[in-house]
Image: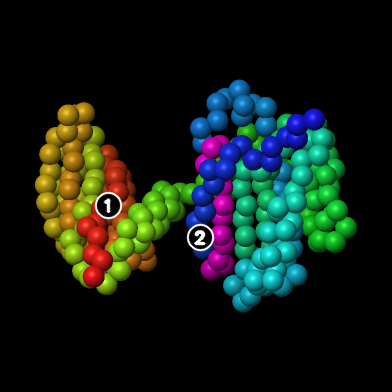
Amino acid sequence: MKSTPLTFSDLWEFFPCNVNNRQYSIRFDTAVESLNEEIKASYPHTLELLVHFNEMNEQGLPTPIERARINNIEDNLTCGTYDVRLVGVITGDGCVRFAFCYGDEAEAEHIAQSLLGEHKHTVKYECKAFLDNNFGYYYNTLAPNNYERNGIMNRHVCTNLEKDGELFQTPRKIDFFCYFVTEQHIESVAEELKQQGFSEFARDKTEQGDYLLHLTREGIPELAWINEVTADILDVLEGTDGSFDGWGSPIHRS
């Protein structure tokens, strides 16, 4: 008999976040965002399975030994007879929270025990059901906001630069791209970003009918700096019909 898969896909992403001065790491299955309505309707409920750490650092995150233990628990999660899917994992504040969607008419405790298998006898855990949640937990708690999603994309670009030999030592002009539905806000956005150190390279109407604002800024495209710079762009675009469309940098290998 073919076992039920634990996740919708292997297309997972992660991002760090800070809530009330506490550090968290969140992983989420990006495939959830493209599920059709029929599949979503089959998993209306959410189960949160919380496993407490035995050891943690001052930030409430697991020690290396504890991380290995938690990874072992996750690797051995099993659906059993229940049709559940793991959609996200929150690590921080002294525990790890596994979030599952499910459609079974079963008690949350029974599902949790099935998921943990033999670990149910050796771990301290809690479980909570959010009935008829309809993926609200995923979108409100797991999915990244605009800034966090931007940080994920920045990480990918920086990783690709590093793979291509970037040494992150030499300042250069870095390109940033914004698109607007209309011309209404382009001038004010351009002027505000110029005051923050950007230079305008071009502004054009595209073949699709929207408007491009191409900016440059001198710097070294290290992730922390890029996150700060792109967050500033998002701040300026707030309340306009513009959107940030990423950045690009020439590679400096020496």
Q: Which residue is mark 1?
A: 247
* Horizontal and vertical percent position of residue 123: 81, 61
Q: Is residue 181 magenta?
A: no
Residue type at mark 1 is Trp
Quadrant in the picture for residue 47 = top right
Residue type at mark 2 is Pro
Q: Which residue is mark 2?
A: 16
Name the residue rendered at 26%, 66% in the picture.
Answer: 253
Residue 100 versus residue 39 in the image, above or below: below
**Number of callouts:** 2
Q: Is residue 31 magenta?
A: yes
* Horizontal and vertical percent position of residue 145: 45, 49
| Label 1 environment density (alpha carbons within 10 Å; few <14, some 14–19, many ≥20) | some
Left or right of residue 111: residue 36 = left
Name the residue rendered at 65%, 72% in the picture.
Answer: 63
How far, Cα to Cα, is label 1 from label 2? Answer: 21 Å
Q: Is residue 154 visible?
A: no
Question: What residue range appears in magenta?
Answer: 20-32
Dominant SS type (magenta): strand
Quarter of the image with the C terminus is bottom left
Quadrant in the picture for residue 131 = top right
Contact between marks 1 and 2 (CB within 8 A): the answer is: no
